[in-house]
Amino acid sequence: MKAMLHDVSRCTGCMQCVETCSLENGLVQKGADARFKTGDLSAERFTTLKRTREGRYVRQQCLHCLDPSCAAACPVGALTRREEGQVVYDATRCIGCRYCMLACPAHVIRYQWETPMPFVQKCDLCCDREGGPACAEACPSDVSIHGERDELLKIAHERIRANPEKYEQKVWGEYDMGGTGVMFISDTPLDALWPESLGNRSIPSITWPIANKTPFLALGVAGFLTGASWLIERRNRLAEEQTEDDRAQTAAEENQPWH
């Protein structure tokens, strides 16, 4: 499967990746030099750079999870994971529920709030572009490498072994959240800019056992409520019948002649 590896130690913060992504996807930038500024992701910015406390620049974009929670949460299949590994969005299926935004652990999915006919927006890893992601191709410092995930992991671990004093002893995204298609190695900790740790399990693997039982739980609750409603209605009906009998007996007694 296809993936991308970022070496944070090589990034100079030139923003060439952000500019290239903007041009490749025809995104509108507010302000003449907006694409050259660090900032948050938006419907007009699919990739960006965030600065760490140590002064390093870390790419933020869709992580293309191996078991994507956005796709699991989408009720209409607007988000799917291709066999090549890219998590892609089909606007023709989207109903605008935005469950994907709530489900994404990296909070990278954005919505066109200012558009009359809004859609979800996110990086698709240039899935239909010959040559792979434009951002990786444009990087002048070889920060990003695109290729087969297994090969990229070999490269990542080889760099870490060759320079153990330089790199943190971890490949972010190798196992986190069940594994991601966009991975990082770094000479400084990335935990502050990485999604909150869920261990090595993906969100769908955690939530599916519960979601799988939901229909049965719902049927059980519905059965209980139906039974309770029947019992309450029967009790009320018996009480009304008893009241009517009491009234009839009282009326009969009142109508009896005095002796």
Image (cartoon, rainbow, N blue to C red):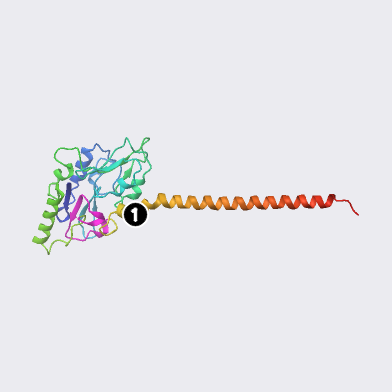
- Among the 4 quarters of the image, the one containing residue 8: bottom left
As helix, strand or loop, the secondary structure at mark 1 comes to helix
Name, please, the residue furthest toward the right. Answer: 259
**Residue interval drawn in magenta:** 174-194
Where residue 189 appears, x then y in whole percent?
A: 21, 61
Q: Amino acid at mark 1?
A: Pro
Q: Residues within 10 Å of mark 1 (few under 14, many from 20)?
A: few
Where residue 211 appears, x then y in whole percent?
A: 37, 51
Q: Quadrant of the C terminus?
A: bottom right
Number of numbered discs: 1
Q: Is residue 248 left or right of residue 84?
A: right
What residue sits 85% from the left and 51% below the top?
Answer: 256
Q: Is residue 54 left or right of residue 252?
A: left
Q: Is residue 159 magenta?
A: no
Name, please, the residue furthest toward the bottom. Answer: 165
Where residue 162 appears, x then y in whole percent?
A: 8, 60
Residue at numbered disc 1: 209
What residue sits 41% from the left and 49% below the top?
Answer: 215
**Viewer-proximal residue, 233 or 68?**
233
Name, please, the residue furthest toward the left. Answer: 162
Q: Is residue 182 magenta?
A: yes
**Viewer-proximal residue, 66 or 15?**
66
What residue sits 36% from the left and 51% below the top?
Answer: 212
Where residue 83 appears, x then y in whole percent?
A: 20, 43
- Among the 4 quarters of the image, the one containing residue 95: top left
What residue sits 52% from the left and 51% below the top?
Answer: 225
Q: Is residue 159 left or right of residue 54?
A: left
